[in-house]
Image (tube, helix red, strand yellow):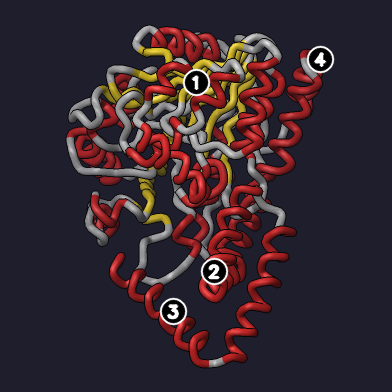
Amino acid sequence: MVFGLLLQIAFIAAALKFFNDRFVFFSAASMFLSIVVLVWIINDNTNPYYKLAWIIPVMLIPFFGMATYIFAKLELGTHIMNDRILKLIDKTSPFIPQDQDTLDEIEKISVKEKNLAVYMKTYAGYPIWKNTYAQYYPIGEDFFAAIIPELENAKEFIFMEYFIVERGEMWDTILEILARKAKEGVDVRFMYDGMCSLMLVPYRYPKKLEAMGIKCKMFSPIKPVLSTVQNNRDHRKILVVDGRTAFTGGINLADEYINKVERFGHWKDTAVMLKGEAVAGFTIMFLQNWNITEYGKEDNYAKYVKTDFPELEEKALPVGGYVLPYGDSPLDNENVGQNVYLDILNRAEKYVHIMTPYLILDNEMTGALTYAAKRGVEVIIIMPHIPDKIYAYLLARSYYAELIRSGVKIYEYTPGFVHAKGFVSDDKRAVVGSINLDYRSLFLHFECASYFYKHPVVAQVEQDMQDTLKKCMQISLEDCKSFNIFKKAAGHLLRLIAPLM
């Protein structure tokens, strides 16, 4: 597949160079079109760093840069997928309506909180809910232990959507339960991102699962054909059982996430479980992506959305506060994931504590982090000390000095790798989900998360932040000065292509 893609790129580049070298008219036309494309890029409604990432190749290699940009912007596949997703969001919206009484109740506490909820429903399609129990898991082993009994007790359906699946103890245990439940008549569906087919599972793995009775799909299968659609991966982590229980977070289905194998030291990751009304948000979110390819045979969405939850009362589970599950699409020009993070930073009064494996920032996010710190808010970012991708680590460290000089405190998790994605602020707000602080998560991937306001789980997230800080080393300006000079130079050079990483 990689060879096929490289061959196409080489052929296009060679053809363009051939015409450019031999025909004055073609050379003049490509130069004129490059100027038109530069004006197009400058006036495009997109992130300035993306504009810069495109302007450089258009200016350095006009004929190739210009042709590549036009291809990326006009490619039919991206527009078809986006139209399909928007139609599915409109179609499913009636099944997750916003309860006006809940909004009115929030408004009495905070008008700004109510405004965020209105934005999320209007532009992302997801409402804020009450009557939802949540349990936070500070490590992958706890998450794994929690999902097994939920899967075993499934009676109607199991929906799973994950970025990574790899054969091993974790996945083999889950797969055995899924196959057994499918034989019992449970509607079992499993969707994973097509990137897994490159190294982790066979390309025809869905056929194997379907033979077990499990409905299975690869999201955007990798094909040896140039297409910008393949740049938009499904990075979500969703598990829904019977419409009554849902899980999300940073944890994928592979053994390093539960520390059964060691990769990059100790693997620190997190997840959250929901029970109650807010589960409907994840149920519909899963069905939206599942039905992208189901032309003419979509699901009866009402069948999967539950409205009564007697088990909450039977088990006396605490359901105070508000929960907002949400998804983010890279195709709709609405940067929901980034906007939620910015909203937390801009409204913080005392503190914002963050865990993220990657730190690749645009000017807007950098400005929000530094401004919060400058006005006296305690801003702490917990990063990995042992990276999984050296280029991402060098790039992240290129931001350290600027952030630290503004008052942001940066810590690295010395036992190993942090894969958790979490924000918590002022003992009031928290986010647990799949969204990293990098360009791919914020602008290029399908993502998901749960936002909590005045919910008991917020204290659990903050407690985990404090417990994790005890295992971290703080990075100082002196540390930044002592970093290897060649690695520092590499990090700063990588900023030129940061939006593409």
Query: For the residue marked with disc 4, what is the amino acid?
Result: Lys
Tell me how far mark 4 sits from mark 3, CA to CA: 60 Å
Does the CB distance between marks 2 and 4 fall below 8 Å? no
Q: Is residue 321 visible?
A: no
Q: In the rendered image, which residue does mark 3 sit on?
A: 12
Q: In the rendered image, which residue does mark 2 sit on?
A: 65
> In the rendered image of this protein, does residue 405 appear above or below residue 69?
above
Q: Is residue 392 left or right of residue 62?
A: left
Q: In the rendered image, which residue does mark 1 sit on?
A: 381
Tell me how far mark 2 sits from mark 1, CA to CA: 36 Å
Q: Whole-percent x and y of residue 428?
A: 63, 13
Label 2: how many Cα within 10 Å (few below 14, some 14–19, many 20+) = many
Q: In the rendered image, which residue does mark 4 sit on?
A: 108
Label 1: how many Cα within 10 Å (few below 14, some 14–19, many 20+) = many
Residue at the spot x=49%, y=26% of the render? 400
Q: Secondary structure at mark 3?
A: helix
Tell me how far mark 2 sits from mark 4, CA to CA: 53 Å
Tell me how far mark 1 sits from mark 4, CA to CA: 32 Å
Query: For the residue marked with disc 2, what is the amino acid?
Result: Gly
Chain-order first, disc 2 or disc 1? 2
Tell me how far mark 3 sits from mark 1, CA to CA: 43 Å
Which quadrant of the structure image shows residue 206?
bottom left
